[in-house]
Image (cartoon, helix red, strand yellow):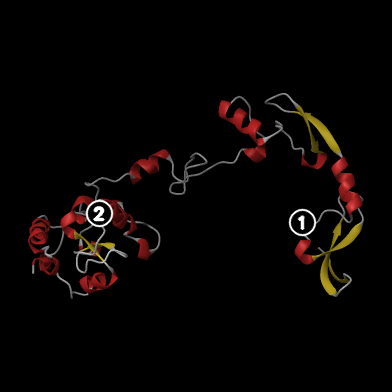
Amino acid sequence: METTTFFDGTKYRSGIVKVCQQCGDDYVVRADRADRSRYCQRGCKDAARSNRVVLRCASCGDEFERDASKVRDGVQFCSDRCKRKEHRKGGLIAPAHYQKQHLCVKCGGETSARRRLCEECRAKRTISEDTPISAIFYDGRAASKYCRIRDHAVKKMSSQPQVCEATGYERCVYTCHIVPISAFSSSTPLGVVNDKRNLILLSPTPHWELDHGHLKPADVGREWSFREWVDEAVIAGYIPEEYRK
């Protein structure tokens, strides 16, 4: 498109030369309005709107008018309601611009408009207590690798009173793993990682202290239940022997 400079009555502006869709004459429009502008003046715009055709709705049978420039090949409907009604019945084939194909974001297979995953990928995503954690790892950013495991842990602890077990604080409490997720072998079942004996509710400061070794399960009265769980996990080979100390 050709660019030029014009005076709009207040100052000089950069503009783009376009062709009026009604009369065919060249006219200049501001660059920031070039995508929306189609007519050189209001008269041409009104004349284009008066160029309407009468159509018959394929669903209800009523006649309706539409701009000739907006009429496309295929079945015509008077409203979105009629269009959706016929699509649900499956009796009519919509125009090509309505036939959008929806693909699964995981495998690329076909899926419905309201689902990001196909039925097969959704079935694979279903998790249980026996699902190995390697099957639940998020394959996006590294920082989000364990997000699904953490979500499962939060849901599991949602029935507990949301109070920090170290300070009694109630306003900001997180579900934390005493033994971090990264310490488990990839074949460890989700039920072992998110066992309630390995989960603890803490506010931000005690959470930091737990991660850096300054807070122990014994400090919050969790020593015996935690030790029992650690023995079981070590014997099964899910975590290293060092966590028995």
> Where the C terminus falls, by quadrant?
bottom left
Which label sits in the foreground, 1 or 2?
A: 2
Q: Tell me residue 204's x, y (percent).
A: 29, 70
User: Which of 104/11 is in front?
Assistant: 11
Name the residue carrying label 1.
36
The residue drawn where x is 65% and y is 30% is: 82
Q: Tell me residue 216's x, y (percent).
A: 14, 70
Please state if 19 lies on the left or on the right of 238 as rendered: right
**Judging from the image, what secondary structure is the residue with disc 1 in?**
loop
Q: Tell me residue 150's x, y (percent).
A: 30, 57
Please state if 59 lies on the left or on the right of 127 as rendered: right
Q: Amino acid at mark 2?
A: Met
Mark 1 crowd level (few <14, some 14–19, many ≥20, 10 Å Cα) = few
Quarter of the image holding residue 138? bottom left
Q: CA distance from mark 1 to mark 2?
A: 53 Å
Q: Tell me residue 176's x, y (percent).
A: 25, 63
User: Which of 236/69 is in front?
Assistant: 69
Q: Mark 2 and mark 1 in contact (Cβ < 8 Å)?
A: no
